[in-house]
Amino acid sequence: MDNISFEVKKGEVFAFLGPNGAGKTTTIRMLTTLLRPTKGKILINGFDPLTQQAQVRNSFGIVFQDSSLDEELTAWENMEIHGILYKIPAETRRKRIKGLLEIVGLWDRKNDLVKTYSGGMRRRLEIARGLLHHPKIFFLDEPTLGLDPQTRNKIWEHIHELNQKFETTIFFTTHYLEEAEKMADYIAIIDKGKIAASGTASELKKQTKTKSLEAAYLAISGKDIREENASTLEKMRMRMKRIRRM
Amino acid sequence: MLNTIYIMWLRQIKRYWRSKSRIIGSIGQPLLFLVAMGFGLGPVFEKAGRGNYLDFLAPGIMAQAILFMAIFNGVELIWDRQFGFLKETLVAPVSRLEIVLGRVLGGATIATFQGLIVFVLTLFLGFRPQNILFLPLGLVLMFLIALFYTTLGTGIASLMEDFHGFQLIMNFLVMPTFFLSGALFPLESAATALKSISKINPLTYGVEGLRNVFSGTVGMAVTQDIVVLALLSFITLSLSSYLFSKIEA
């Protein structure tokens, strides 16, 4: 990352776009206290991730790109652990877990092990879990990756509702540009570690004299395919394959 | 604070308890050692006038089972790293120390339980402890062995990105630790070099302690074993909490 600077307003739906390897996930890692920036200043809900870790961590919820659920536990148990880690009192915790699992349509399956869940169910569970402590900011790193249109639609309904109801600030990344165009109040396009452009969807289209966000995006970040560093999970899968072949 | 430790502890226990194949699988190896060594080497041992070999071997195999399980539980951290759950705990508003303590206590509890299973197994095979009243003391020793190796495994796992190094740990740490601990043969008649190595091997103290407890000779030696293991556990616990706190995900 190279000296990027941006601001997300309270209650805004902010889309963070860019080609693979542009630095989206790295930025999220820095914003969420998982990685220390070498220089510069970050404020999350008014708190500094370097010096006020606990306050920052209480302020946000996150859905990582790769699943971070415990597959050997049930949905309920995953929620319970989260609630306890975030120090939500038992009674409130149980009420909220029930409410959230109902919203994402997993209440009937609450006692099933997560490893029996489909990709879409897992993602819905992660969203419900990330919201359990009522975060002010919700980070979603490619929340709809690899899901069918129905599930994607459903997930966006939840996110939209949440944003409207609780004024939760949404910060998301995606490669589905129509999602960004439809859902985001504000868009930043990052490329090669720098912010290449930012604005509302219509501003970006106007700037580049294009008709769709996709065309605007390609005009800004170019049409070349980027070399991506495989994510840890992908690396692991590749390795497993190699081991099996041996 | 205690809630976090408790829930991380409980998570380990649940994962273990649900994986019946893991429980059964982890009994296989100790059983093999007990049967093959016990009935194979036993007669030779007795012919040499060293008494009942099973009485000698049983505490050693309990220690072996605990060692393997504890190291594995510690290294399981890499698993969580690869499958993502670690991140969930790393962004939570709790200190890393609480997470480590919960994990380590969970892993140590499981490994202790493993030792207890092997203890029961040895009873079936004919092992007879001198004084069953010393069993609680045996459990203390088992827990300390478990704690030491779980924290050691956790510390090593904090430094590892993936499972590539696991074979290395098995071959260069776990197996030598086991074979050079006096679990299988008496150390006092072993070659001097081997004897000196076993002196710096923490498991030696665990095996010796368990052997003394189950043969009913509880005294200074056992106290010393407990102190040594407790001190070592404290050191590895501090070290692995530090290493764990440095993990970036």
Image: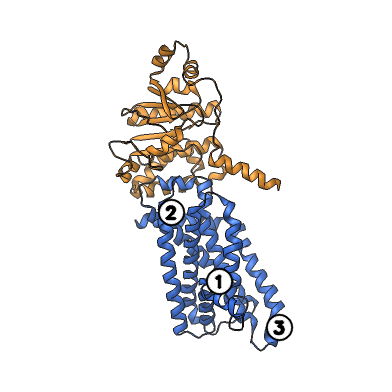
Chain colours: A orange, B blue
Q: Residue furthest front?
A: B193
Please name the residue shown 54% across and 20% down the image: A223
Marks 1/3 in contact by CB < 8 Å: the verdict is: no
Identify the chain of the residue marked 2, using the numbered disc in the image. B
Q: CA distance from mark 1 to mark 2?
A: 26 Å
- On the image, the x and y values in percent for residue A22 come to 47, 30
Identify the chain of the residue marked 3, using the numbered disc in the image. B
Q: Earlier in the sequence, mark 2 or mark 3?
A: 3
- Secondary structure beneath disc 3? helix
Please name the residue shown 70% across and 45% down the image: A245
- On the image, the x and y values in percent for residue A61 come to 39, 38
Height in image: A217 above or below A172?
above
Residue denoted by label 3: B44
Q: CA distance from mark 2 to mark 3?
A: 47 Å
Q: CA distance from mark 1 to mark 3?
A: 23 Å
Residue closer to the observer: A172 or A209: A209
Residue type at tag 1? Ala
Residue denoted by label 1: B63
Please name the residue shown 36% across and 50% down the image: B94
Residue denoted by label 2: B244
- Secondary structure beneath disc 1? helix
Residue closer to the observer: A104 or B96: B96
Q: Earlier in the sequence, mark 1 or mark 3?
A: 3
